[in-house]
Image (cartoon, rainbow, N blue to C red):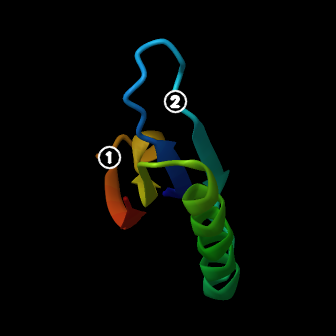
Amino acid sequence: MRRYLELYEISESTVEESDFIRIDITEWSSGDIEEAIRLLLEHARSIYDHYTIQIHECGHEEEKPCSATIVASR
């Protein structure tokens, strides 16, 4: 099962496309994941009014459902 750290900008604009960042963290250590979350959160807080950061457990390769855990949002 693949694991992704994802940042979604939640924008009220219908003209511009919202930002989306996806990082494959499948092979990462927990310390590296925590550092990436910290950096994404710092980035999101400085740029976006509204965002969601989540860990996406992707089961598509195994023909299983996906799940997501929200790490932070505003």
| Label 1: which secondary element | loop
The one nearer the camera, 2 or 38, is 38
Choose the circle earlier in sequence order: 1 or 2.
2
Closer to the camera, 57 or 35? Answer: 35
Q: Specify the label residue 28 is tagged with.
A: none
* Image x and y of residue 8, in percent: 48, 44
View extreme (bottom): residue: 31
Residue at 61%, 84% in the rendered image = 30
Q: Residue at x 53, y 48 (%)?
A: 48
Please identify the quarter of the rendering in which residue 34 is found: bottom right
Which residue position holds label 1?
Answer: 64
Who is closer to the viewer here, 32 or 74? 74
Residue where numbered disc 2 is placed: 18
Where is residue 60? Give x, y as percent: 42, 40
On screen, residue 70 versus residue 45, left or right, reads left
Mark 2 residue type: Ser
